[in-house]
Image (cartoon, rainbow, N blue to C red):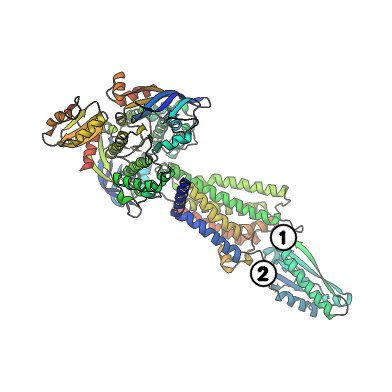
Amino acid sequence: MITLDNITKTYNKGQVLAVKDISFSVEPGELFGLIGPDGAGKTTLFRILTTLLLADKGSAVVNGFDVVKDYAKIRNSVGYMPGRFSLYQDLTIEENLHFFATVFGTTIKENYALIKDIYQQIEPFKDRRAGKLSGGMKQKLALCCALIHKPAVLFLDEPTTGVDVVSRKEFWEMLARLKAEGITILVSTPYMDEAKLCDRIALIQKGSILSIDDPAGIVRSFPDKLYAVQAGNTHLLLREVRAYPGTSSCFAFGDALHVTFRNGEEQGLIPYLQGKGLPDTTMSAITPGIEDCFIHLLKS
Amino acid sequence: MKQLLTFIRKEFLHVFRDRKTLLMLFGLPIAQIVLFGFALSNEIKNTRIAVVDYSKDAVTTRIISKIAGSPYFNIQRSLAGGQELQAAFKKGNIKMAVIFPAGFGDDLTHTGKATMQVIADASDPNQATTITNYLNQIVLDFNAGLAQDAAQPMQILPEIQMLYNPALRGAPNFVPGVMALVLMLVCTMMTSVAIVREKELGTMEILLVSPFRPLYIIIAKLAPNLLISVVNLFIILFLSDIFLDLPVKGSLLLLVTGSVLFILTCLSIGLLLSISAKTQQAAMMGSLMGMMLPTMLLTGFLFPIENMPVALQVLSNLVPSRWYFIIIKQVMLKGLGVAAVWRELLILTGMCVLLFGISLRNFKIRLQ
Amino acid sequence: METVITTDKLTKRFGSFVACDALSFTVGRGEIFGFLGANGAGKTTAMRMLCGLLAPSSGKATIAGFDVYTQTEKIKRSIGYMSQKFSLYDDLTVAENIRFYAGIYGMSRPAIRTKTTQLLEELQLQNEAKTLVRELPLGWKQKLSFSVSIVHEPGIVFLDEPTGGVDPVTRRQFWDLIYAAADKGVTIFVTTHYMDEAEYCNRVSIMVDGVIAALDSPARLKAEFSASSMEDVFYELARKAKRKGD
């Protein structure tokens, strides 16, 4: 459905490298996540795929059309939700939806079934101006506007950034339902925990792809055994575990530390810590999460 | 105190690192001094006038050569008579006509007085007053010379008639100028800002990634401004009729046609500006700096174009409001028809089509 | 423990809308205090009052012993502030930014010089001293921003969502900086959207609809709500919020 082949893009006459040699593909009906922090190149890729930018090198195909030669056909058949939910601030919810429906040559009624679940949540506010909506409501409206013409492919650029936790959860539930309708969805997010809700993900940092696989596969590729180490005083624990000579890597993860050790050295950690004023330490082997993998890939 | 100095130092750093603003801060005053000091002037020189001599005697020859010798006047031609004069005034080829009736010299010698007729184009009352004053000076001078030579006192009396604006009101001059300026500013600024606003908000991205054709985006952005400007036009015409006693003497349809052409040209300029501007602020500054200054200085209502150095005169040909100004004066004030303004209409049409074409071609269908 | 922030029924009303309703809590010296809440819960308003930027409608509060009504200038001099939008000047260099903020806080010339060298060393930005900030990668900008906010060695620093959008490694490096500051006795008042960062705090308060719905250490909050993570605790409380971030 979507294919990228060695896409490279620079800005400022080659001075700033945005993305380099990116290649991957998205199958029809897949929910594909592009995971990476700010500046990784996610928005650049989206803009190339939605034909808003021309890549310096490489080629890409969306829904069977080339992004350069057949851009008009792509523009007719995709839904796009750029970052910051571009909506018309001084138009109401209903006016925004109506406008976008008309722009895509359709009416609200025609595809209402597709957006019904989402729109009903904001319908009570349909006469409120978009500028006065909360982040969560803007997000829902922007999604409706992107779906109103029943696109084959949906591009969502950081749809959950700047939105409260509850709305984020609801949004991903909506995406799952849309996937069930057969729409191919390419979504980007900086939140690692959202990665596991996708069919497949690509981890991206500084313009390059670190890894592509389904979430389980990424986790499987983590090379070392990972342990969660906990104690009452996390701060002190962090210092001491890092100081322990057998530690290979140690990162804070909330109330636990995720630690990898050099060969066999994990046995010596607890006694070592007991001697450092941390008697109540616990340690257990855990399955790595996407963030663990991302950090590992960053270091290599 | 130290904190204040720290802050001031930072502000200086900001200013000097902003190349574009720096250019404006230093470049603009220099440009203005050069323009106002050397190029633009209110002085009248080489005004085109006509001389009609029905008498053709010694006195008229002498006084005509005195007028010809003056740096203020440029005798266009010695015309035959009434019809030609009218036509020349209508076309704007001459600003003043001096007519010596038959038997001028005889009248002078026999009665001690002779009247010469002076007709001045008063659609620019300041200019008219100035040139008639110059002429008066020349005549007075000539009279003084006469008094020295002859035994009896002899006096030439100029009889001055102000064409098109007998009361020498300012309105006939500044209303057309203001019309051009206001329409130009509104059209250029509003259009450029409206398009750049979409870019800034990010909604332009969505519009581009849709079946909506860029041509339609452009037309949609131009349409409200066109309508509002036409309404503005009618308001200005109405007000100048009622309050300034300056009705439209000629065909309203012709005036509106010329105005719409001018409006479309300005809208196209706004369109062109919006393509290069990245922020609304830049669009507004571009409209103001880029268009207001040339319009005010080079349209011809503040400073007569004939008096500018050749370089500026050539430049003024590029300013659409210069041509529109002529159309307004010819149609609204002088009541003339298509024949008098077809050239200007054609020029405006050409400008409009060219600018629109360039804008359409350069309208970015992508983000970079 | 010595308290550096105290609030007593601190309230802010905008017309008939009560943004913050009778907030009462204290923060001790050297504590890392997490201030959480959904959008529109009243977090930003509360922080502004504590920084002396907004006058409360009623209630009391002291920061570093100074009254928020009458001694705002003294408050501003005793605190550091860093917001997500960085507050660094893009068109000034790294060194110029440090010097500027140090100067604004009234540090002496020799002190500024020493501090600048020290900061550049700590952040390993010696080679970038003359680079314009806009050319720095995001993570470095953030770390610089934090260091600049404590350049005058204040006792309390307010961090408004300081780690938005950076990669996981940089985020943790940032928290290393926070820990280092807390070890020196600086009190950290931080808001964040990352629930794992809530766990790094000594105590966390969660605001919902203008009131503090919960305030305790992460461990005890998880026990109270029978949750395995702070995310679940937060979700439990945020779900019931009536204000959807209007």
Q: State the mark number for residue B45.
A: 2
Q: State the mark number for residue C245.
A: none
Pointers 1 and 2 within a single chain: yes
| Quadrant into which the C terminus of chain C falls | top left
| Quadrant into which the N terminus of chain C falls | top left
On the image, the x and y values in percent for residue C99 come to 39, 47
Give me the chain letter of mark 1.
B
Q: Residue furthest left?
A: A264
Direction from residue B188 to residue B301 in the image, left or right: right
Dot 2: element: loop
Disc 2 marks a residue whose amino acid type is Lys
Q: State the mark number for residue B125.
A: 1
Q: Can residue A70 be seen in this view?
A: no
Q: Which of A154 and C141 is in front in this view?
A: C141
Q: How far apart are marks 1 and 2 (CA)?
A: 16 Å
Direction from residue C155 to residue B158 in the image, left or right: right
